[in-house]
Amino acid sequence: MSLLLQQISLCGKLIASKVRAAGLSDVLGYAGSTNVHGDSVQKLDKISDNIILETLGRTGVAAGYASEELDDFVPLNKNGQYLVVVDPLDGSSNIDVNVSIGTIFGILARPVNSVGSAVKKEEFLQPGKQLKCSGYVLYGTSTMLVVATPSRFPEINDVVNGFTWDPAVGEFFLSHENIRCPIVGKTYSINAANENKWSNNIKKWHNNMKDNNSLRYVGSMVADAHRTLLKGGIFVYPEDTKNTNGKLRILYEANPMAQVFECAGGSASTGSKKILNIEPTSLHERTPVVLGSKSMVEDFEIACVF
């Protein structure tokens, strides 16, 4: 696991260097294709995906790799003990305008009796509560690696730590120890342009939020969730008439971010149930996502169920 996290941090550095020089090296813009979800693929999406895949392929620790950008999983080392699920570059629409973007990752353990044999798709379809580790890299004013480590023992708390990259030294240093999400906040993040597609209950909740809170929405999940994690508040990407099952992918976005918030004392829900309890049935299954301060997520669930 330590080696795998070291490799993921290396990927963060490599991607950060590409992002910082994007305007100078002809890697901005549309790559000329769409991914399995029908989303336009940006050049940096493909570059980031290749960086992670190639780096993990050299470790021997990862048995398989599944990405938002790929139709199917990629087998790596059949003797590897872990599977890695990744959104290589979250916030693609913000790449060309120099707004914060990020990489989201999750690490799953293979069943013990599967190690040594070819990886199967079913091994990736584990509920988020089975994640051994998860986190994200935020490429913003600084590059930060946030890692959530759930405890295996009831007497020891789950831990979320943040590490900031010092480019002068070339290493990540612990800068945000034992991150805890405040129980309540004053901001909410939601794409208000979709309001006419929401259910009446979500519209009512949104109108109530306007009275006492400030709307903050970047459009990169990593950026919006990171602010919510540190400052408190709520991030919501609900189902609507266009995306009846939600927009965000369970394996690559919802589960890793949900674990980060749960480990930090926050909450993560679909609006009606815990994200981490979902049993995924396909590699690219979607779900509504509600992340944030525990009391605010609970209020959303109450408002939207009744």
Image (tube, rainbow, N blue to C red):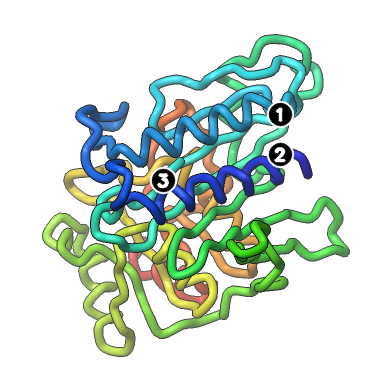
Name the spot of residue 268 as percent of width and height, x first: 51, 59
In the rendered structure, the answer to whether residue 98 lies left or right of residue 62 reads left
Of all residues, the one furthest to the top in this rendering is 117
Mark whose residue sits in front, 1 or 2: 1
Give the amino acid at mark 2: Leu
Q: Residue 216 occupies which quadrant of the picture?
A: bottom left
Instruction: Tell me which label, 2 or 3, sits earlier in the chain.
Output: 2
- The residue that label 1 is drawn on is 59
Say above or below: 157 vs 63. below
Q: Nearer the viewer, residue 206 or 61?
A: 61
Q: Residues within 10 Å of mark 1 (few under 14, many from 20)?
A: some
The answer to whether the residue labelled 1 contacts the one labelled 2, judged by CB atoms less than 8 Å apart, is yes
Say above or below: 64 vs 255. above
Say above or below: 180 vs 2. below
- The residue that label 2 is drawn on is 4
The answer to whether the residue labelled 1 contacts the one labelled 3, judged by CB atoms less than 8 Å apart, is no
Residue 50 in sight here: yes
Q: Residue 27 occupies which quadrant of the picture?
A: top left
What is the CA distance from the residue labelled 1 to the residue labelled 3? 21 Å
- The residue that label 3 is drawn on is 89
Identify the residue at horizontal 55%, vertical 64% (top origin). Answer: 267
Name the spot of residue 58 as percent of width and height, x first: 67, 26
Identify the residue at horizontal 46%, vertical 72% (top origin). Answer: 227
What is the CA distance from the residue labelled 2 to the residue labelled 3? 19 Å
Of all residues, the one furthest to the bottom in this rendering is 212
